[in-house]
Structures are given as structure tokens and as C-alpha cells.
Image (tube, rainbow, N blue to C red):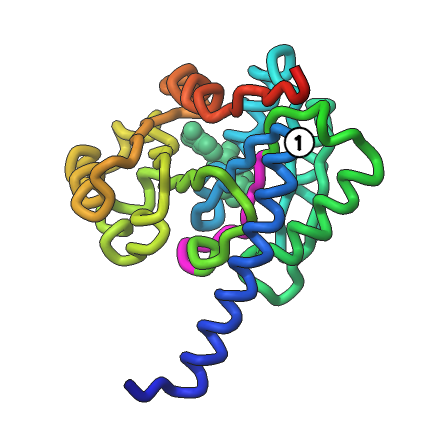
Amino acid sequence: MHQSIDTVIGLNLLHANQAGADHNRAHFDDWGITCLNLMSSPGAGKTVLLEKTLAALQGELKMAVIEGDMTTELDADRLRQYGSPVIAINTGRSCHLDSKMVAGGIHRFKEDYNPQEFDLVLVENVGNLVCPAEFEVGEHAKVALLSITEGEDKPLKYPIMFQEADCLIITKIDLMPHLDIDLEKLAANVRSMNPHVTIIPVSAKTGEGLATWLSWVKQQIKTPVIANV
Ligand SMILES: Nc1nc2c(ncn2[C@@H]2O[C@H](COP(=O)(O)OP(=O)(O)O)[C@@H](O)[C@H]2O)c(=O)[nH]1
Ligand SMILES: [Mg+2]
């Protein structure tokens, strides 16, 4: 079958990115770190969820954040107050983090900290419902967020993100009384493409659903491998 030059370039790009992602994941595996990649459109609530997660789990897990933003360290600065290392990556004109950028972040992390002491790396991807889903960064699980203000049809319109997600956080459920969203329809739209996804409705404002999210996060943590016993 004939493929256009654009398709060939695109496939090569994704192939190279995948190799880099596998390399990053191998490092995380060596260090016993679990890496979660949080993705959503801008404003769905990734940074607020990370703030709640760092605050809630800091006594239990050693965490670091890789914070992707096109420009600014606004989110990174918000997260730094929780005491965990936050590695900021500005992607410039790129609408997603790729595995090479994250490899650079891992390198900086390694210079300043001993990665073997860490349990969890949380990646906040650039706000975008399309591209981040196509570019793995070395994560063990993908977390998609969708706020209820975005509408129950969005999983159908932006399918890759929702097909790929291991966990879907439906955010801002405290706003339910002000909206006409049908949560069951939203969940059915996602499950029609991804039957096994874990769906957790959350309000970072009232705290509803946060305990379920935190316990899902803890379930993802690798059991430490004890060598030479
Ligand atoms: N009402 C309400 N607002 C929220 C919730 N989560 C986030 N927000 C607000 O949504 C806006 C965007 O949140 P942010 O975490 O910066 O989104 P991000 O762009 O995905 O990182 C901020 O004004 C938050 O306060 C929530 O659960 N309920
Ligand atoms: Mg953010």
C-alpha cells in the first residue's frame, strides 16, 4: 500500500518516540519507580489534582513531578510548595511532552537526587486532548482527566486519549447542579471504546472521590525488588 511522505515521517517520529519511552520506563523500572502520565485539555484540573495528591501522600510515598508546560513555571511553582522535587519542562511550540524531553527531565532529576529513594513520578502533560495521547513518555499508566464542563461527547470526539487511558478522572463534579451533563452517558461513551478503564468522579474542591483516586494511585506502586537476597 502506498503511504504518503507525511505518513512515513509521522510513523518514524512515533517509532523513535516509542523507543525513547521504553528507555525511560526501563530506568524507572530499575529504580522501582512508578510513573503516571496525567493528560487533559487545559483547565480540566491536573495541577489541582496533583496538589491534592502531593499533600495527601507525602507521608507515605516519596514522589517527584515532571511538569510539562509550553511556557512558564506557574504550575511547577504551585507544586513546589509541597516539598517534592518538581522538574519543569517548557515544550516551546510543542503541544505535548515527548520521551526525549522527559529523558532530559530524568537526567536533571538524577543529578540532584537519588532516584532509587523514590516511589512515584507524576507527569503533568501539556494541556491538550489530542497529541499527548500519541506520545508515550515512559509511563506505566495513563490518567486522562475530563471536567464535566467539557461535555459527555468529548470522549467520542477525541477518542485516542480515552482509548489509551488506564484511569479516567471526571473532574469538578461539585459543579453538577449548574450543568446538564449526563455522567452515565459520559461513562458509557468511554466504556464503548475502553471497557476496562477505571472511572473515578472527583471534586478537588469538596474532596469527593479523592480517596478513591489516592487508593488507585497506591495500587499502581511497584513492589520493591530486593536484589541478591
Ligand atoms: N469547582 C471546581 N474547580 C476546579 C476543580 N479542579 C480544578 N478546578 C479549577 O479549574 C481551574 C483549572 O485547574 P488546573 O488544575 O490549573 O487545571 P490544569 O490546566 O488541567 O492543570 C482552576 O481555576 C481550578 O481551581 C474542581 O474539582 N472543582
Ligand atoms: Mg496545569
| Residue 169 as seen in the image, left or right of residue 26 | left
Q: How many marks?
A: 1
Q: Position of residue 85 (x, y in %)?
A: 73, 31
Picture layout, residue 198 above or below residue 145: above
Give the quadrant of the C terminus: top right
Which range of residues does the magenta coloring cover? 122-130
| Residue 149 as seen in the image, left or right of residue 105 | left
**What residue sits 62% from the left and 47% below the top?**
24
Name the foreground residue: 2 vs 142: 2
Picture layout, residue 23 above or below residue 94: above
| Residue 128 within the segment the image draws in magenta | yes
Q: Residue furthest top?
A: 59
**What residue sits 53% from the left and 20% below the top?**
223
Q: Position of residue 54 (x, y in %)?
A: 60, 23
Residue type (three-letter) at the residue carrying disc 1: Trp
Which quarter of the figure has residue 199?
top left
Give the quadrant of the N terminus: bottom left
| Residue 184 within the segment the image draws in magenta | no
Residue, disc 1: 31
| Residue 103 as seen in the image, left or right of residue 120 | right
**What residue sits 78% from the left and 39% below the top?**
110
Q: Residue furthest front?
A: 228
Q: Position of residue 6 (x, y in %)?
A: 44, 83
